[in-house]
Image: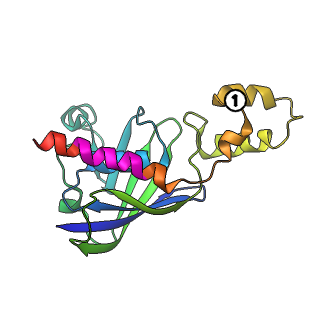
Amino acid sequence: MKFYQLKIELQGLNVWRRVVVPEDITFYELKQVVDASFGWSSYHEYELAIKENLVFVDRAEEKNTSYSCLPYEYKESRTSNVFDYVKSRQVIQYLYDFGDEWLHKIKVEKVYKDIINEEFFCLEGEGICPPEDCGGVGGYLYALEVLSNPEDDEYEHMIEWLGIDDVSELQVDFDKDEVNKYLKRMKQLRELRKR
């Protein structure tokens, strides 16, 4: 089996991950890899696009009917294999949370043949993921500015709004081992589904 090394970058911030995934990964599983690698909770809507008009989502048939006036072709993310559509060096765009619009660019960096037993794992990364529902890149940068000054009039409100107890929760370093714990669970769930 082939394995693909991907670099995933959260646009607008210096936050990225480098992961390895198997060749038979679906777009839905790729979404789960990104969410686990960045710390997203997976409760927002999403889409993965590889061309201007080819988009992978849940409930594709419904979207093709509802949005038939748009120049998009929607495909089912749970049954579409990533590497049936994506070629080397092609960029996949993953949009998570249509309100905050967290845009990730995913690029194939390398292809390996039968390198390991682990199906999903993180090699490295940098930066911590912003909190959910903080207003996107602009909202997050504004929150960091407010939280840099405990004397700011909005400081306490910002702590409460972000759902944190202390600013130090936003200053945690990237933890590859923690990411790999989640990715290992993905492999276990995948094996159960195949039975």
Magenta segment boundaries in residue numbering: 180-189
What colour-coding does the image apply? rainbow
In this orientation, which residue lies closer to the viewer: 155 or 50?
A: 155
Mark 1 surroundings within 10 Å by alpha-carbon count, few (fewer than 14), some (14 through 19), many (20 or more):
few
User: Would you identify the image quadrant in which residue 188 lies?
Assistant: top left
* Residue 73 locus on image (x, y percent): 23, 47
* Residue 17 locus on image (x, y percent): 47, 59
* Residue 170 on the magenta segment: no
Identified at 85% across, 40% down, the residue is 149
In this orientation, which residue lies closer to the viewer: 1 or 178?
A: 178
What amino acid type should be assigned to the residue bearing mark 1?
Asp
In this orientation, which residue lies closer to the viewer: 109 or 70?
A: 109
Residue 61 seen anywhere in this rendered image of the structure: yes
User: Would you identify the image quadrant in which residue 62 lies?
Assistant: top left
Q: Residue furthest left?
A: 195
User: Is 172 on the left or on the right of 178, as rendered?
Assistant: right
